[in-house]
Amino acid sequence: MLIDSVGYFIYGMCVMFYSMMAWLFWRKGADVLSRLIMTIMLICVVECLKDLAIYYFVDDMTNRWWAVMTATDIVIIPFYIYVLMELVKPGWLTWRKGVLHEVPFVVLPLLYVVTGNVIWYYAMAVWSVIYGSATMVLTFFFISQYHRVLKERFSYEENINLHWLRAILVSFFFILLVWTCSSVMIDINFDNLYMVLSLAAWMFIGYFIYKHESVIDELSDDDTHQMAEVSTHEGGQTGDYILQPQLCEVVRVLFEEQKLYLNPKLKLSDVAQKVGTNRTYLSRFFNQKNGKTFYDYVNHYRVKYAEQLLLSTNDPLLFIAEKAGFNSQSTFRRVFSSVYGCSPMEYRKRKGVK
């Protein structure tokens, strides 16, 4: 069974795309997530070239050759998991964890290639599905916990919800599912379909990762360096620094006098930079001292400012929402209603403002 011109074209497109993606993420930076995606892309390139070599040099594509070609592809599966975990739980991946997760995906294919016993091939396919499914469930659990993290880091919701992260998770699982079907269906057309779908899925994943780059950077940055600076600044008493009266006064000035909350894209890191502390301590300050997340704290000021505009002007709601620091009128309505129990328009009417 030889690959046709369509198959060569598809493989050529995949090699070019994966090579370009590897270069882009290499240029993006030396962070763990970028390096992981770059590694996945390079492995995909090698696997495509390996398949092309087998198609070209092997005239009689037997079940054995097909299984060998498929079996060697599973080394990439743990790397998908590393990317997901780095997205939902930054810092989780260590060299030890990476090696432990990779071992079964190296040993099982080797056992099949060396012994030729088909039981190792099916064990490999079953283990891949179990591993992928279990990780998908675990990652969904971590994503559900991530909502509070977002409210501790951002003062807005637009473009930072986690639907994109769930979409990436489903895309990875979809690739695994199609690969599993391809491993048991010896059909060149189905293999071409798998290559096209994988290519489309990675275009989708790459788009979302680049679109939410600022969110990913905000959630994955390490505060270790900043913690050391705070420790030096306060003579080593980092644990008490955040609760000292000076910090309360600095934050009050930033919000009540400088009206920092009017910035619609305000992040915890922006405030931390102005205060001279790190995000970990500042987040603890908002939670312990004020009993609110950063998101709730900032929007409390925005709502109060919007209330003044509602009562003192006849400006339309959209203008008031933007002037008070909200990114959208819908968010303004929702936050305002949660505080006052009615919509902004109803509030205006109750107060007799025409």
Image: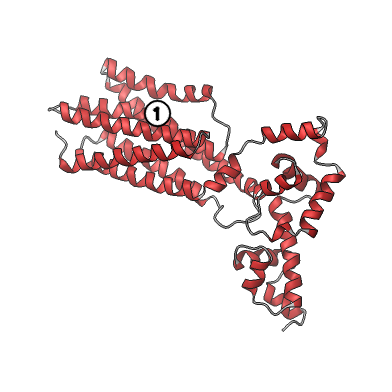
Q: Is residue 91 left or right of residue 59?
A: right
Q: Is residue 284 left or right of residue 43?
A: right
Foreground of the two, 227 or 124 = 227
Instruction: Describe the element under mark 1 as helix, strand or loop.
Output: helix
* Residue 274, x across and y down, in percent: 73, 47
Foreground of the two, 137 or 98 = 98
Instruction: Identify the coloring.
Output: secondary structure
Quarter of the image that includes the C terminus: bottom right
For mark 1, what is the residue? 127
Q: Residue 314, located in which quarter of the rendered image?
A: bottom right
Q: Residue furthest top?
A: 115
Q: Residue 123, located in which quarter of the rendered image?
A: top left
**Residue 250 visible in the displayed image:** yes
Foreground of the two, 4 or 119 = 4
Identify the residue at horizontal 77%, vertical 79% (top origin).
Answer: 351
* Residue 221, x across and y down, in percent: 61, 39
Identify the residue at horizontal 54%, vertical 29% (top origin).
Answer: 93
Q: Residue 80, located in which quarter of the rendered image?
A: top left
Q: Is residue 121 left or right of residue 36?
A: left
Indicate whether 312 appears above or below 339. below
Q: Residue furthest bottom?
A: 354
* Residue 197, x across and y down, in percent: 31, 45
Mark 1, other Cα within 10 Å: few <14 / some 14–19 / many ≥20: some
Q: Tag 1: residue type?
A: Trp
Q: Is residue 343 left or right of residue 1?
A: right
